[in-house]
Image (cartoon, rainbow, N blue to C red):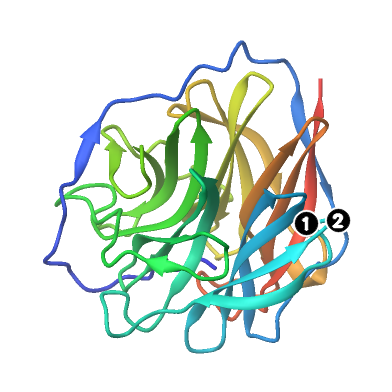
Amino acid sequence: MKRLLLVAALGLAACGRYSDFQLTSVGPPETGHYEWAPHSGPIYREQAVDTLNPSVLAWHGSLLNLYSVYDGKAWHTAKANSSDGLAWTGAQRILSPDPKTWEGDYIAANGAVVAWRNQFLYLYQAGSPPRIAISRSDDASRWTKEPAPVVDFGPRGAWDERATADPYLFVSGDRLYLYYLGEDRARRQRLGVAVSDDGTRWTKLRSSPVLELGEENAFDENGLGEPAVWQAHGSYWMLYTGRARNEVRRLGLARSADGVHWKRTGLIIEGAEPWNNKVVCDPTVIVEPERVRVWYGGGDVAHPAENVHGQLGYGELIWKP
């Protein structure tokens, strides 16, 4: 799911906390590159208009997937389980938008899950325009939302003044790092980062965004979103969704020494089959010694939000020294 065609001016802006920081150095960087090895065909779809935004977590010998489902009116978060990452069972909806609160009635989905201090934390987006919220669980089935957003709009003129969305959580040491989409008043959608010690109180990087729009006619000239970050081979890596001018979506790969300063690698992942030939988006990753496992959303309609016949796909990034 890709979203955010915003029109109304906002009277509310939150300054929040800001600082300068970097992630711990993991270098020196190894010489080599990743190559994409796609799995043929979709691996999962609910009986819904769209099934997108996987967030996959290894847990007690199996895999947990919190993903997004669009029923034609609203986006919900559901969960499923798998032993191999390809066949998913036990589908259950766990979060829906609450129209009685700030969330409204459109979305409580497009999130990221981690296991953190004996709990599951799930950051998701809600509201219109969207902001990032948090829900917690002890068993991944019963979830408790906090009553207010945890990553709010930036101040007037900020890169994320009009929206915060597309959260992705990266754990480093005893800290949580949040990579997310911000939208400014010119409707530019770019990527930034924040840090937290508890998942609720976040400090934004003062110099965000950390990745700007692509050049004219690039696959990501019209917007960036849905980052997925990991550490391997002496570097940090980020898969992200890029929107072209015609709203075709593909994945790009960027590399960083410190998690703040990013450089595109040139790898672009696009759909090569009828089911995902217009949309490849929403990556989530699990890092293994010989590969990076990637789950993603795919569709056959070029649109920035929904009704793309969304299904979940799978592929692997293989390191080539």
* Residue 182 vertical position relative to residue 306 in the rendered view, above or below: above
* Residue 290 vertical position relative to residue 246 in the rendered view, above or below: above
Question: What residue is at 50 percent from the left and 72 percent from the top?
Answer: 305
Contact? badges 1 and 2 (CB < 8 Å): yes
What residue would you read off at disc 1? 314
Q: Looking at the picture, how far across and down is residue 282, in whole percent?
A: 60, 58
Q: Amino acid at mark 2?
A: His
Q: CA distance from mark 1 to mark 2?
A: 6 Å
- Could you tell me which quadrant the C terminus lies in? top right
Q: State which quadrant residue 277 falls in.
A: bottom right
Q: State which quadrant residue 310 falls in.
A: bottom right
For this rendering, which residue is in front, 230 or 226?
230
Check disc 1 and report its element: helix, strand or loop: strand
Judged left or right of residue 94, residue 292 is right
- Could you tell me which quadrant the N terminus lies in? bottom right
Question: What residue is at 55 percent from the left and 73 percent from the top?
Answer: 303
* Residue 92 vertical position relative to residue 124 in the rendered view, above or below: below
Q: Looking at the picture, how far across and down is residue 49, in whole percent?
A: 63, 85
The reply to whether residue 209 is in sight is yes
Residue 39: which numbered mark, if any?
2
Question: What residue is at 68 percent from the left and 59 percent from the top?
Answer: 64
Q: Looking at the picture, how far across and down is residue 149, in whole percent?
A: 29, 61
Judged left or right of residue 254, residue 46 is right
